[in-house]
Image (tube, rainbow, N blue to C red):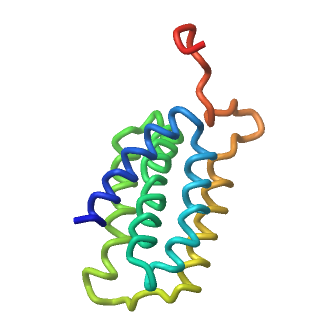
Amino acid sequence: MGLTTALVLGKAAGGVLADRYGRIFVGVGALVASLPLLFFATRSPAAGVAGMLLFNMTMPVTLVAVADTLDERPGFAFGLTCLALMTGALPPLLSLTQPLSATSLAICVSASAALLWLGLRPGPREPSRDVPALTEQQA
């Protein structure tokens, strides 16, 4: 129950915090912060739950990034993100994978953080979408 709650809260918190503080800061920061917690998850279930909460904060960030990139094709953006989830779920569902070692997990999370940072940076002519502009009500 605790792990499921952490997954749900991570996704919700990731969306809210990314809207407030920016996608790069929240998405990459959550991945980096999850790394030591996930590394020690086998020794401490509480660390594993906290690490999964942080790790799941990236989901709304990546979903919105794909939707923004494919803004002219919202159906394709939705389908592509669903395909990514299904692809990631297949190996364990088909019993085709063994649990990752702590070192392998650390490498995967580090690579994900680097790729997320690269993917969220604005292009040469694209304005930054990372931190939303303040409205008059917020200022």
Task: Depth check: give the residue in front, 59 or 29.
Answer: 29
Q: Is residue 12 left or right of residue 130?
A: left
Residue 92 image position (x, y, % from top left): 31, 82
The image quadrant where one finds the N terminus is: bottom left
Residue 5 image position (x, y, % from top left): 28, 58
Task: Depth check: give the residue in front, 116 or 77.
Answer: 116
Quarter of the image for residue 48 reads bottom left
Q: Is residue 76 left or right of residue 123?
A: left
Q: Residue furthest left?
A: 1
Residue at 59% x, 86% y is 103
The image quadrant where one finds the C terminus is: top right
Residue 13 image position (x, y, % from top left): 42, 45
| Residue 76, placed above or below residue 53 | above
Quarter of the image for residue 44 reads bottom left
Residue 112 image position (x, y, % from top left): 58, 65
Residue at 69% x, 40% y is 122
